[in-house]
Image (cartoon, grey):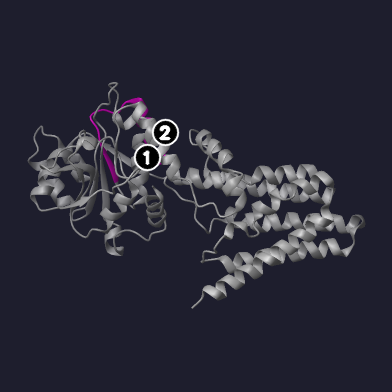
Amino acid sequence: MEIAATTALCRMAQGEIGFNAGEAMALGALIGAYQEDDAGGLRALLPLAGRTLIEYQARCLAAAGAAPIVALVERIPVALNEAFDRLRGEGIAVVAVSESNEAVSRFEAGSHLIVLADGIAPDMGDLARLLEEGDSAILAVPDDEAHADFERIDGTHRWAGLAKVDSGLLGATAAMLGDWDLQSTLLRRAVQAGARLLPSSPGEGRGPFLASGEEAMAGFERRLLVASRTAREDVVSRYVLPLVEEFATEKLMETGIRPAWLVQVAVAMTLAAAFCFTRGWDWAAVALLLLSTPLDLVAQRLASLRMKPLGPSMLSRRLLWPAAGLALLALGWFEARHGSGWGAMMAALSAAAFAEAGRLERVGSATPRGEWLFSRRTAIWLAIPFVIGGWWNAYLGIMASYAAASFFTVQHLRHRLTP
């Protein structure tokens, strides 16, 4: 499974994996982008998740902290130039060079380089392990039938398409290169210089992917979709929304929609639902809330596919919970003013207070069977039978009891599990 690789990516994005502070500013990357695929086009331009392979490669390297990122090309067709423009729009600058000596000039003397072979989509777990190596290292796969298309290193190993070398070795290789292939020659010289061979991550859905054509890329795209699945922490996201989440992610990954926009839309819809509750427009409010529930899940998956995981401190993500609490209070306020008295408002306040206390109790710790505890999504979906029957007083009372029971359950479990 790709869970470990996705975790590695998140740790990279949050700065937990990489070189020390002195080395972090001197990590560059070199990508090959000149070999052709089975149809005669560039491997680098094969479609992947609505973009191209080279964009995925650049995002992986940028997530690892590499800068500059240099692409070694023979020519720059319009599609490749458009890919570079899209990357620049994301804040990832890729410099295209056509000569080995020009590539050398782009890197600082004494810096480390991540070399990524032409047509290779790296395993993020492999990349994380490579970053942790202090010296030169080469990722290797077994010399077997499954890896017959990978470049051979020796009688038992083939190159997984990732290596870490010193920029001095790149300069020395370019100086003696002539008409030879830069990446292959650099690989040979790194082996001769004693670079350590690291085995690539074994297991189904792990390890590097070598692009050959569009059909093969479709299979890898499915692998990425599976890897982007996040932990489903409540019963609704686990049992109700997976199909919606999967469908939306597949469709939206081919668009230019930014993940942050989806979270912002979810917040706006929740606030709009709160307004609808104050006007007595119950059906509109519940519809808005229901439509908002998968948006942050889809946003997380899109962000993972684009190698830019959403940060936990992201303002719109932090606003989802209080916005939902505001909608609950708006419902209690309306019911209190229209025949239910102060009890409705007190139930809404109690539900919101216990829900927030339970959320704070759960921060930083896993709760056994925690998906059955009170959550924003669960509270929204439980409203369906009550809006049909108009039983809002019962709903508010049940939510207050549910939130309180969840809070005391979390407290009990935390104290019981604490040594």
Instruction: Please tell me which residue is depicted at 79% across the width and 55% down the height of the picture.
Output: 395
User: Left of 359 or right of it: where is 250?
Assistant: left
* Residue 401 falls inside the magenta stretch: no
Q: Residues within 10 Å of mark 1 (few under 14, many from 20)?
A: many
Q: Can residue 416 be seen in the rendering of this structure?
A: yes
Which residue appears farthest toward the top when viewing the image?
39
Across and down, in percent, residue 253 comes to: 49, 36
Displayed quadrant of residue 343: bottom right
Instruction: Please tell me which residue is depicted at 63% across the width and 47% down the height of the picture.
Output: 293
Mark sitting on residue 51: 2
Mark sitting on residue 56: 1
Which residue appears farthest toward the bottom when viewing the image?
419
Q: Can residue 66 be seen in the rendering of this structure?
A: no
In terms of secondary structure, where does tag 1 sit? helix
Dots 1 and 2: beta carbons under 8 Å?
yes
User: Left of 192 or right of it: where is 161?
Assistant: right
Across and down, in percent, residue 224 comes to: 41, 40
Magenta-highlighted residues: 69-88
Which is more toward the observer, 46 or 365?
Answer: 365
In terms of secondary structure, where does tag 2 sit? strand
Instruction: Please tell me which residue is depicted at 54% across the width and 55% down the height of the picture.
Output: 314
* Type of amino acid at the residue the image marks with label 1: Tyr
User: Left of 93 or right of it: where is 391?
Assistant: right
* Type of amino acid at the residue the image marks with label 2: Arg
In the rendered image, the vertical position of residue 173 relative to residue 356, given as above or below: above
Displayed quadrant of residue 155: top left
